[in-house]
Image (cartoon, helix red, strand yellow):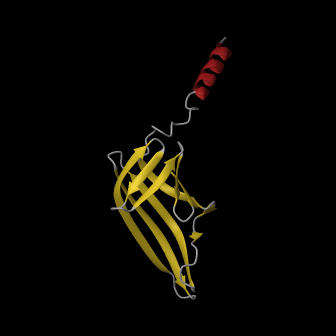
């Protein structure tokens, strides 16, 4: 009898928390880290814009406040023709709005970035698919 009760309790606990969050309503507040860019882990070598310069995206973080504000920071490291690396850190901020699983980040008028929340990840497409997780 005791084993049956323990087994029933374990099955009940295992069943709890198996439901994924609803992407249309679950909170997106928190700090999100870029995990992959175009399916590749960081650092990600960006497409060549200037010949002789290689630029890598090494970090991208987005902090989302439940109150509707957001702030991000990303870091790029550039190397020109074998010279010493140069690091640029870019900060952005603004407000966000949500319609179901679609999140729009306003950076200033008319600039905006869109993402889709799948219940676990924020997925953006800025120069390729970017997947952020908490």
Regarding residue 8, the answer to whether it shows in the image is yes
Regarding residue 134, the answer to whether it shows in the image is no
- Could you say where residue 38 lies in the image, as x and y percent from the top left? 61, 62
Left or right of 110: which side holds 133? right
Residue found at x 57% / y 78%? 48
Q: Which residue lies furthest to the top in this view?
A: 1
7 versus 129 height, above or below: above
- Could you say where residue 90 lies in the image, as x and y percent from the top left? 40, 69
73 versus 83 height, above or below: above
Camera-nearest residue between 3 and 113: 113
44 versus 117 height, above or below: below
86 versus 27 height, above or below: below
Camera-nearest residue between 114 and 81: 114
Camera-nearest residue between 91 and 3: 91
Left or right of 32: which side holds 40? right
The N terminus is located in which quarter? Answer: top right
- Could you say where residue 133 lies in the image, as x and y percent from the top left? 52, 51
- Could you say where residue 95 lies in the image, as x and y percent from the top left? 34, 54
The part of the image, by quadrant, that contains residue 113 is bottom left
């Amino acid at each position: 009898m005791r084993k049956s009760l323990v087994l029933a309790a374990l099955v009940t606990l295992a069943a709890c928390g198996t439901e994924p969050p609803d992407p249309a309503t679950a909170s997106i507040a928190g700090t999100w880290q870029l995990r992959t860019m175009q399916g590749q882990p960081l650092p990600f070598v960006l497409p060549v814009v200037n010949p002789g310069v290689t630029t890598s995206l090494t970090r991208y973080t987005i902090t989302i406040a439940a109150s509707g504000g957001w702030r991000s920071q990303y870091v790029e490291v550039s190397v020109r023709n074998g010279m010493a690396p140069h690091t640029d850190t870019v900060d952005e901020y603004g407000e966000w709005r949500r319609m179901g699983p679609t999140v729009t980040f306003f950076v200033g008028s008319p600039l905006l970035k869109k993402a889709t929340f799948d219940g676990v990840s924020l997925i953006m497409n800025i120069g390729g698919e970017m997947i952020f997780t908490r």
